[in-house]
Image (cartoon, rainbow, N blue to C red):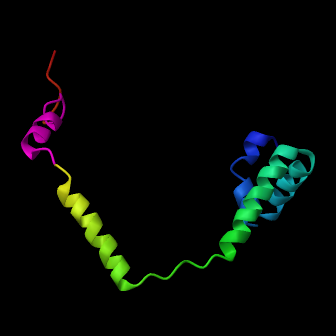
Amino acid sequence: MNCKQLDELLPLYAGRDLDEKRARLVSEHVQICSTCARVAGEYREAVELAQHFTPPVFSDNVYASVRRQVMQQIEDKPTAPLVPQMLLVGSGPGWLGPPPAR
């Protein structure tokens, strides 16, 4: 295996989510490639941190406040008129039927 092939497998390797054959191939490569060994170590550290992570507890008031702020931003966002958008979508050949005969 080369480094490019391992790129997508290293996170799975760090999380012990590879089948035995692929895990062995990755392990063999990591033993001879310092760059991939470093990246695999970083992924292992991230997996370890994630396993011990406890998300913070927020009150219902905090969630309600965030929800209000998001809804306010959505409401304040200007929207384009719908009719011009429909004209743009429907104006190309083939949108309303077959393309014109030549």
Where residue 61 sits: x, y (%)?
A: 34, 82
Quarter-of-image position of residue 88: top left
User: Who's the residue at 44% across and 81% down the image?
Assistant: 58
Is 69 displayed left or right of 101 in the figure? right
Placement of the N terminus among the 4 image quadrants: top right
Is 97 displayed left or right of 23 in the figure? left
Q: Does residue 33 appear anywhere in the picture?
A: yes
Viewer-side residue, 57 vs 16: 57
Viewer-side residue, 17 vs 55: 55
Where residue 95 sits: x, y (%)?
A: 17, 35
Where residue 32 sits: x, y (%)?
A: 92, 46
- 92 in the magenta segment: yes
Q: In this view, does 27 lie above or below 54?
A: above
The span shown in magenta is: 79-95
Q: Does residue 18 appear anywhere in the picture?
A: no
Q: In this view, does 101 lie above or below 60?
A: above
User: Who's the residue at 72% across and 53% down the image?
Assistant: 9
Where residue 39 sits: x, y (%)?
A: 77, 51
Is 1 displayed left or right of 56 in the figure? right
Quarter-of-image position of residue 75: bottom left
Q: Is residue 20 above or below residue 56?
A: above
Total numbered labels: 0
User: Who's the residue at 83% across and 53% down the image?
Assistant: 26
Q: Is residue 13 above or below residue 94?
A: below
Placement of the C terminus among the 4 image quadrants: top left
Quarter-of-image position of residue 63: bottom left
User: Who's the residue at 10% across and 46% down the image?
Assistant: 82
